Image (cartoon, rainbow, N blue to C red):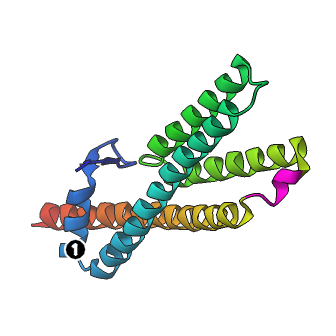
Amino acid sequence: MLERNLILDDDREEVSEETLLSYTFRNRGREIKEEYEKHKKSLKSARTIMLVNAILGLLADIFLLANDSYTDGVSWAIVAGYFSIMIGLYVLSFRQPLLAFVIFLILFLGMWILSILGNTDEAYRGIFLRGLAVFLLIKGAVSAGRVQGTRKELVSRYLHEREREEREQATE
């Protein structure tokens, strides 16, 4: 399991996500923890969709290029570069999920528009699957935004509770 450290703003201290969640749970944050876990599960599903989308796109492009007699090295380089960027965004989604999903969605729609401009017959080919992919990526971006927002709230609560405990210890 990946243990991510959250950097707190005050003194650049790093605290693991698990520590933060357990601390918040002990200090009246059960509902936030449950909400966070729900959005995190949804984000995990969205990441899987992102990865599957990138792999299926690569396989479709390889199939199309392999069956095209006019394929050159530039076409293969573009496909490899596009796939590399998509996998890079998948990896980025573990650190900056909202940013990764927004960029992934923009590139996905951009490539779809470019394929339509290149060949108008492409406009309706696979429209249901592409529409479903766009819907699921938007849903993933929403979940990513909620996870990041809840994470910020957890950090804020953690800092507030820690400051309160430190004040109580100083007065004793």
Tell me: residue 107, above or below residue 140.
Answer: above
Residue ID for mark 1: 25
Q: Residue drawn 48% across and 65% down?
A: 149
**Quadrant in which the C terminus appears:** bottom left
Q: Is residue 59 visible?
A: yes
Q: Is residue 13 left or right of residue 100?
A: left
Q: Is residue 152 visible?
A: no
Q: Is residue 144 left or right of residue 161?
A: right
Amino acid type of the residue that numbered disc 1 sits on in the rendered structure: Phe
Report the span colored magenta. 121-125
Q: Is residue 84 left or right of residue 20?
A: right
Q: Position of residue 61 (x, y in %)?
A: 65, 39
Q: Nearer the viewer, residue 126 or 158?
A: 126
Could you say whether the residue bearing mark 1 is in a helix, strand or loop?
helix
Q: Nearer the viewer, residue 22 or 114?
A: 114
Number of marks in picture: 1
Q: Residue drawn 69% across and 32% down?
A: 65
Q: Is residue 75 left or right of residue 22?
A: right
Q: Residue drawn 48% across and 49% down?
A: 51
User: Label 1: how many residues lie within 10 Å, few (<14), some (14-19) or many (20+)?
Assistant: some
Tell me: residue 66, above or below residue 90.
Answer: above
Q: Nearer the viewer, residue 10 or 22?
A: 22
- Main SS of the magenta part reads helix
Q: Residue drawn 68% across and 28% down?
A: 78
Q: Nearer the viewer, residue 77 or 2?
A: 77
Q: Position of residue 32 (x, y in %)?
A: 35, 76
Q: Position of residue 145 (x, y in %)?
A: 53, 63
Outermost left residue: 172
Q: Is residue 46 magenta?
A: no
